[in-house]
Image (spheres, helix red, strand yellow):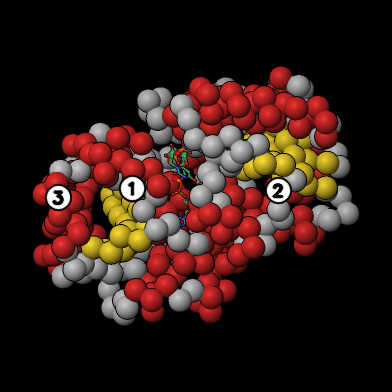
Amino acid sequence: MKIITIIGARPQIIKSAAISRAIRNHFSTEIKEIIVHTGQHYDENMSEVFFDELSIPRPDYNLNVGSGSHGAQTARMLEGIENIILTEKPDALVVYGDTNSTVAGGLAASKLHVPLVHIEAGLRSFNKKMPEEVNRIMCDHVSTLLFSPTAKGIENLEKEGFNLNSVAPFTIDHPKVYHCGDIMYDNSIYFSKVSDQNSKLLAELGIEGDFILSTIHRNNNTDEPDRLLAIFGALIEIAEENKIPVVLPLHPRTKKMMELNLTPELSAQLTSSKYIRIIPPVSFFDVIALEKNASFIVTDSGGVQKEAFFFEKPCIILRSETEWVEIVENGNAILCDADKNRILIAYKKLANNKDLTYPQLFGDGEAATFICQEIVKHLS
Ligand code: UD1
Ligand code: UDP
């Protein structure tokens, strides 16, 4: 069978490594994968760096859509993906997560009656002001096979009317919902083994002891000056008070918005602090090395908050809600929004908590193989 996989933003490129690896190892005679990169992310360190490192096949197509408003960006992708579907005539189209690339793929496939496979289905923040929430709801409701990483995702889909007991044959009007574990857990286990030998980042940064890893890129945090100020104010205070370095691989969106939205005083403090280490975005091996060796993680990233859990690190989530509710309910992460006081209190609480447990909430590391098996079974 022929599938088209849509990737575009950094986390999707990384996620796709798990499915491409499963195809290479177990389904090479059954599945031919055509990879379409929308070009949503395009900087070397947001895209190119991952292909060789994670053995992802080179994209067969790159739409080079670049950045833009949501409408313009998504429209360019939609048109490009539609043309590729018409040329390639795939048996199914696979999308990951909740970005504009995901929704463009979902719309293009469903309008052309190509069965859609949504990996990371069912996740909800219950905040439709988040562009990702709209993208993921729309994709779920035009999918034929929905693969949810968590039990909560299954519960959300059931509440939206999905029948959890549907029987084959499956279609857009009669979809199938699976609880299959998280392909990013597959990837974290798989690449964790090699990241130790390959990453030299900590040595290059001269970091030996405790440090905090932080990533920030959510649009409401970067684009609202008060929120950005509160987050950086808290990070500086934690770093200086505890004499602990904070390593911050900076998303290009955040870099741009810091120049616009931070006060000259705070910018000067960040530059002069010997504890704040702002660096460009890093490769996946490097980010795993940071996650494994950090003593604490502060993030608004969906992926990084979960990887904090995978590598058993306490985490502050710089959002008011999360799709990954399990890690909050289990006490491993605290939602602090962009509230300086809540961040400072949560740090004290979590940094000194030695009783955290990390149960296996995200599957067994074999989600990608299961997904491929079900695609072949039902869509070929
Ligand atoms: C997107 C996703 C978000 C995901 C994130 C992962 C949507 C709506 N958002 O957000 O869900 O968590 O990717 O990182 O799809 N830029 C560059 N170089 C690049 C890419 C982006 O400079 O390679 C800058 C541009 O100024 C661009 C801005 O970052 O306007 C935002 O990029 P965009 O892809 O629109 O959204 P993200 O914030 O990256
Ligand atoms: N990541 C990376 N380099 C970095 C920061 C993050 O490789 O400098 C990885 C991270 O480990 C995770 C993914 O990118 O697997 C998450 O992407 P991001 O935070 O951009 O998006 P989100 O998960 O919030 O959609």
Q: CA distance from mark 1 to mark 2?
A: 28 Å
Q: Which numbered disc, 1 or 2, marks the residue that appears first in the sequence?
A: 2
Q: Residue at x 67, y 62 (%)?
A: 55
Q: Residue at x 59, y 50 (%)?
A: 13
The residue identified by callout 2 is 59
Quick check: 141 left or right of 128? right
Q: Which numbered disc, 3 or 2, marks the residue that appears first in the sequence?
A: 2
User: 283 or 338, which is in the foreground?
Assistant: 283
Residue 152 circle label: none
Q: CA distance from mark 3 to mark 1?
A: 14 Å
Number of other residues with Cα within 10 Å of mark 1, as a class: few under 14, some 14 to 19, many 20 or more: some
Residue furthest out toward the right: 29
**Residue 272 % position (x, y):** 16, 62
User: 10 or 323, which is in the foreground?
Assistant: 10
Pointer 3 residue Cβ closer than 8 Å to ligand 1? no
Number of other residues with Cα within 10 Å of mark 2, as a class: few under 14, some 14 to 19, many 20 or more: some
Q: Residue at x 35, y 61 (%)?
A: 279
Which amino acid, by three-letter code, is at mark 2? Answer: Pro
The residue identified by callout 3 is 266
Q: Which numbered disc, 3 or 1, marks the residue that appears first in the sequence?
A: 1
**Marks 3 and 1 in Cβ contact (< 8 Å):** no
The residue identified by callout 1 is 255
Q: CA distance from mark 3 to mark 2?
A: 41 Å
Q: Secondary structure at mark 1?
A: helix
Which amino acid, by three-letter code, is at mark 3? Answer: Leu
Residue 50 figure quarter: bottom right
